[in-house]
Amino acid sequence: MIRSRCQSNAAFRHSTLCCVSAHRSFHTPGTIRLIPNERAYIDEAKYHVGKSKIFSSQFGCQEHTLISPDEMRALHPLMNIQDDDIYGGIYTAGDGHIDPSSVTNAFANRAKDLGGIIEQQTEVVAMTLLPDKRWEVITRTSKGEEKRTVADFVVNAAGLWCDVVGRMAEVRVPSVVIQHQYCITDPIPAVKEYHDKHGHQLPVLRDLRGSFYIRDERDGILVGPYESAETMQLAPKEWRETGMPMDLGNFLFEGDVERLMPHLERAMEILPGLAEVGMKTVLCGPTMWPADGNHLVGPAPEWDVAPNYWLACAESYGIAHSVGLSSYLAEWITTGEPPYELKEADPARYGVWATKDWVSVKVREAYGLNNHPHFPNENLLAARPVLLETKPLNSGIYELLEAKGCQFGFHNGWESANYFDPSAGGKQNGNAYGSFQRPDYQKHVLEEVKGMASFGGICYWPFSKYHVSGPGAVAFMDRLVPNRLPKVGRCALSYFLTPQAKIGSEVMLARLSEDEFYVVSYPEQELFDWRWLQMQRDSFSSDPQTPLKDVDIKNVTGDFGTLMVSGPESRRILGQMAGDEAAWSNDSFKFYDYKEVTLAGIPCRALRVSFTGELGWELHPASGDLEPLYQALKAFEPRLNDWGGFAMGSFRLEKGFKAFGSDMTRDHHALEAGLSKKFLRMEKDFIGRDALLAGASVEPERRCVHLGVSTPDGLDCVGNEAIFNETTGEVVGFTTSGGFGYLAQRSIAFGYVKSSTLDSGDSLAIEVLGERYPAKVQEGPFKPVLPLASTEQVQSPSASPTVQRSPSAAPAAQSPSLSCSAGGVEGRK
């Protein structure tokens, strides 16, 4: 590991202020998170307490406990709280804080024991990628002595200077230096008295309403606020361009008590003793944050220009997470895959659109919301839409949909429809309807679902897209996916498996010619899949047994847009627009067919695939033709309604389509996820095959199931709820996604449950916001119960014969073990 610009303990401590320890060695009796007496905070608390039961039962973690105000006062007798102000608290026994210097030294000593070399007062001054894809690293000591090191791989753990080191290797590090303040009081007699009486510290407190944490510091109190988005301060703007100056290893900003007064006043209400003593120290230190505060840990997304380059930086809570993140990264480097899914910390979640200026705006929002409730349908609006010069990335279609009341969701820099609210007046609702209950916009989603299912509609979606071509493309793709490659003019739903047969991605392959493939993936997967393709090409090309050269991989995400045209009238409308209805018939344009078509004079790629299970096509015109094609479709058939991602989620839940990213991730083995033989052709060689063969004779310990959940109206699973065996009371699984099926009019979820429980036939229950509700495994799709308008009533006089809503779906659609995204199983021909 090369760590650049080694920081002093003081500077390192300033970058992880929430974890700074008291100098005296004390046992801590845990942490209490104060829950305001407001529904949003209470629901979030119940959700997280319920989620802790999963981690306690499945992974041996400490379970959280929801305690009353009286129990809180008993644990922390210095605390003054009112029952009408505080609902209760989340208590975690054994939690607390640690001394960062001691932890850092422990890591260093262990590294030395293993043969590692640590060079202090040394900076990295240059990095060069060698032809064999190793790195030449030039370092310089404080005495001016330079040294050349050739490394098999580099880990950028350069802290406050990680962006400077990243630029040396042409790697973006989307993070900025911000200011974090904390205060330490003079000694408080009551604190010393408690220490002397009990022999340990008071519990650490985290107040959500006041947005601060409180803990003992010697015989005083440390208050660490998280300021609002309006008051928090970033480092000087020039640092974004040049990086933090090298000579500021022990730098502190000037403390500003005035900015902290709202937090301190609230802290004095909770701990009146704070008002009786002076403030000994106000410290304001630099810390490096990414836009969302979730670290940058993993391989650089620019693997094509910076192979074997890894990030372990912008860790906003670095000391607290250090053991887990270092173990996670070490296993990924040595085995070729991470031990579990941690996409929320992976640098591939940020594209080139995440500029320093963009991060600077977004990080204010994240920092200011550090102690606010975070909803499952959270939709935060800062730094959106992402602008290319002065226009959104998907300008044209964005403004067109915005004028129609589109409420956008953020997808890897792109904006696409969540739902449409004609009453919004062109404004974004954002987080106004954030909730752990069924949100108030449900009436809009219901109308979209009904409109598309009874007639037809259009949805814009910013899929990621790649071209893989060249003489080695067929052999490369054949090794990359576990199922058969499609023939020319056909599509195939496929998966990228890891070496351990975990699910790394889900893609749609369209074969354009013998040696050219069009790969379509989720919007959020753009750089994850790009990096995986590059890593595997490097791996295969260096293997003498599988020399795969001459494979060209291009990211064409920005070159093509996508309109999904779906519903029972979609075939008629598209056929009539094309002037050849016969060419769009089921016999001529079969499910999983790919064709080059022209609609209203606009050429586009047409894929007959569907994530909703309804009859439909994906149309992929050039990006510049996206808006004209949308307008042409609407002009030809004004009755096509607009629908968005939330409607899509309802359809897929009802059909039993698992979603990649929640129901299938690198946490889930292909067999336990239920991938069928259609997707796993064991007669061929592919990544993950050895692991599949090793486990083929053993039943998975858990299986993914489709569930109907008997929650009261207005309450649904959202994912990460505990699943119980009703007979034994044992936690036997967890949900991975959930929501409301608008046509089936019921709550639906996916989850993983112990195979032994499923085989026993015992009843299941799911805990949703503190209450358990019966759940039943569903075989096949849920049937619609809402009456829909007859297609005969809405056809134009020139329409072709009515397309009936057929109960006899394509055979694959009846299997609850099948999944689909980016286009997949179609339920109505």
Image (cartoon, helix red, strand yellow):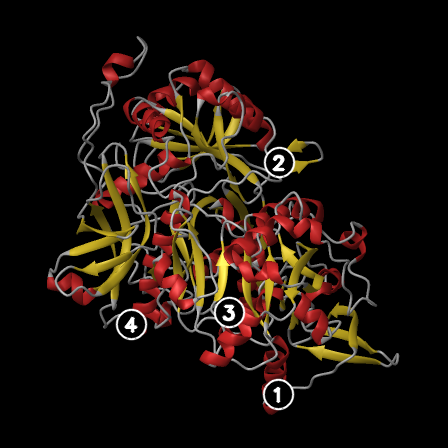
Instruction: Give the numbered dot on residue 613.
Output: none
Instruction: Give the numbered dot on residue 109.
Output: 1
Q: Quadrant of residue 615?
A: top left
Mark 3–mark 1 distance (CA, rounded to whole Å): 42 Å
Work out which quarter of the rendered image holds the C terminus and state it: top left
Secondary structure of residue under mark 1 = helix
Q: Nearer the viewer, mark 3 or mark 1?
A: 1
Mark 2–mark 1 distance (CA, rounded to whole Å): 49 Å
Mark 2–mark 3 distance (CA, rounded to whole Å): 39 Å
Say which amino acid is labelled 4: Gly
Q: Residue 53: x percent and y percent?
A: 31, 63
Give the labeled residue for mark 3: 546
Mark 4 vs mark 2: which is more N-terminal? 2
Local crowd size for mark 1, using a 10 Å CA cut-off: few (<14), some (14–19), many (≥20) = some
Q: Nearer the viewer, residue 17 or 402?
A: 17
Give the labeled residue for mark 4: 695
Give the labeled residue for mark 2: 393
Mark 4–mark 2 distance (CA, rounded to whole Å): 45 Å
